[in-house]
Amino acid sequence: MPAAFADEPTGPTSDETIAPLAVTPSGLFYDIEGGEIYITGCRSSLVSVVVPAEIDGMPVVCVELDFSDLTSLDVSACTQLKTLQCGDNQLTSLDVSKNTQLKTLQCGDNQLNFLDVSKNTQLKTLQCDENRLTSLDVSSCVELKHFSCYENQLTTLDMSKNTKLYDFRCQNNPLTTLDVSNNSELLILFCCENQLTTLDVSKNTGLGALDCSYNRLTTLNLSNNTRLSELWCSNNQLAALDISQNTNLNRLFCYNNYIGDTTALEARLLVCSWGGKVLPQNTLPPVTVAPTIAGDATITLTEGYAKLTKNYAIAGTPAPTVSLVGAPAGFSITPAGALTIPAGLKAGSYSFTIKAQNPVNTANKAVTVKVNQKLVKPAITGGKSKVTLKKNYKNTPVSFKIKGFPAPTLKVTAPKNIAKKITISKTGKLTIKKGIKPGTYKVTITAKNSQGKATKTVTIKVKK
């Protein structure tokens, strides 16, 4: 694989010596070019360096302090800094938040466990390999073209915003997924020695070099990568490899896979400049991985829903058998983890278990489907719309049926002179208390919930 970025600056060879033009009192060597300061080194006795913003009134735009045994480096004053090279030191932290004009940052082979580049929106080259990073956010680096982060401890990388990227190296991390679908400009992709089970390079049509060896890939589709000239995919679990569309391929490494019929590959190796032997059968011992199940533990629905499918990620080698335990009638699941929930379940909770089993182990995932009652506008039925009472009547109940979900709140409105004599319960029982004077009165019952309201008018007549 290529050893360095194509436009990476190169330093003097071992038999070259370049004397600096000047030395600062603090021991920094520097050159002057076009009215700008280029820090080119420091005294070997220094382990902690603070770089000034200016020297003799000229801004510091470049700092090259590789191989200097530094334990501390402060460039926060250098607001016009464009290039920072501080690799092969012993730095445990590096603050570049003030260096907003930075275009090149090379800080590999240190001891960094955190790196914030969110303010470095002009970065085009970022090399932070061989550190101790467990996370790294490059979403703000939209100008990034060269990115190298290999030999860290990164478990995820979001490259969706780095659409100008064309050289990407993330090998030797514990990455389990990698999405490069937005990186259509990629020329070089090195993602070997991770834990990838899938890799989609169908959108990377300009890809020239791909190293995805030492992963767990079972398939690799290269039909859209017609410009591919170098391919490393050894030590995976590939059962087949089709390179019929890769007519520019001149380097091929695909050994230690499960490829059975290697006739086409062996013929192709004859025209490759070099490639290594393709072994014809399962050259790796069978890989076994315990099953895992990922997906929602709770699914919430509302009455009247349509039949639906929920997908669960089922993994394991060999492929596990998948089944449902204790599921209601009509539920089903495919070997790939597509759970089908039938229509028509009434309100309530339905609990069951998804089971994935292979010779290594068994995985179980408890799932509960909660079906909420359908939202219904209020309705008032039953009862009487006219109530006639004798003069000396006793407390008189009139019951109405109240429907709706959520359960409506009830309110009764009556003329002021009888308002205290009319009440309604939560269940819809209207009570006309004794003592109302003879006459005709209209009262209104209102039922209201989040779906709307309903009213019913009741005429009460008390005889003389």
Image (tube, rainbow, N blue to C red):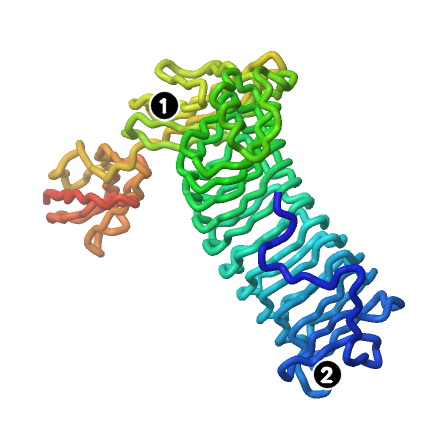
Please name the residue shown 49% across and 22% down the image.
240
Residue 61 vs 338, above or below: the answer is below
Pick the quarter of the image with the N terminus: top right
Residue 289 appears in which quarter of the rendering?
top right
Relative placement, left or right, of 311 versus 235 is: left
Q: Earlier in the sequence, mark 1 or mark 2?
A: 2
Question: Splitting the image into 4 quarters, where does residue 223 fall?
Answer: top left
Secondary structure type for disc 1: strand
Q: Is residue 393 visible?
A: yes
| Residue 423 placement: quadrant | top left
The three-letter code of the residue at mark 1 reads: Ile
Residue 353 seen in the figure: no
Please tell me which residue lies in front, 128 or 166.
Answer: 166
Q: Residue at x 64, y 73 (%)?
A: 81
Which of the numbered marks, if any, corresponds to residue 55?
2
Q: Give the answer, above or below, for where 253 lies relative to 1.
A: above
